[in-house]
Amino acid sequence: NHFAMRCLYSTLLLLSLGSITTCAQINGQVPAQTIPQFLFFRLDNKPFTDNDLPKGQTLFIMFFDSDCDHCQRAIQNIGEHFQAFKKTPVFLVSIDSQNKIDHFMITYGNKLKGQKNVIILVDKLQQFMVKFQPLRYPAMFIFSPEKKLLDYEDNPESVFRLVNMINKNVK
């Protein structure tokens, strides 16, 4: 079954990255503390870089894998609390194909689909893991208007912390 193999592969990849990250954390490495330079692509294949991010605003960036059940729960939780995210630019980033991303959004992220502040990006060059240094999926970052990390969460049940941080920083 393709889905089971994908889950197994994702789990093994994250476990191997997790062990690397654990070693890196011992040396003081943590998720990116500022927004790094990057090149992602919009669903229409137009390039999107860190220079395209809105200036002077708190930003929410989430890296997800369409097959990851924690990512599915996180995006549903964000949808349930979307009112808090309405004034915050939301960037959803994945290495998945457009078909998988579309299915993920229809099935789990339906409350975010079509929202004017939500932009879906594809990480075709697989830069996110290296540049943003998430610990695991879903990697959810809130950056200040100065592009400094305000909060990092990777537990779908921690969406309330993101909501609190956004409420504190976005008027």
Image (cartoon, rainbow, N blue to C red):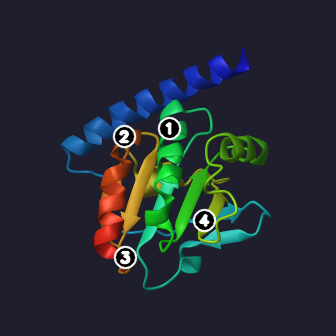
Question: How busy is the neighbourhood of tag 1: few (under 14 within 10 Å), some, or many (20 plus)?
Answer: some
Q: What numbered label is drawn on residue 73? A: 1
Disc 2 on helix, strand or loop?
helix
- What residue is disc 4 on? 118
Amino acid type of the residue tagged 3 in the rendering = Val
Distance in Å between CA atoms under marks 4 and 1: 18 Å
Q: In front: 170, or 135?
A: 170
Q: In front: 142, or 166?
A: 166
In the image, residue 151 above or below residue 58: above
Q: Quadrant of residue 107?
A: top right
Amino acid type of the residue tagged 4 in the rendering = Val
Disc 3 on helix, strand or loop?
loop
Q: Quadrant of residue 100?
A: top right
> In the image, what residue occupies the spot 40% across and 48% down?
134
- What residue is disc 2 on? 157
Residue 115 x, y percent position in the rendering: 64, 65
> In the image, what residue occupies the spot 74% across and 47% down?
102
In the image, residue 75 above or below residue 165: above
- What residue is disc 3 on? 170
Lower position in the chain sequence, tag 4 or tag 1: 1
Residue 68 x, y percent position in the rendering: 55, 33
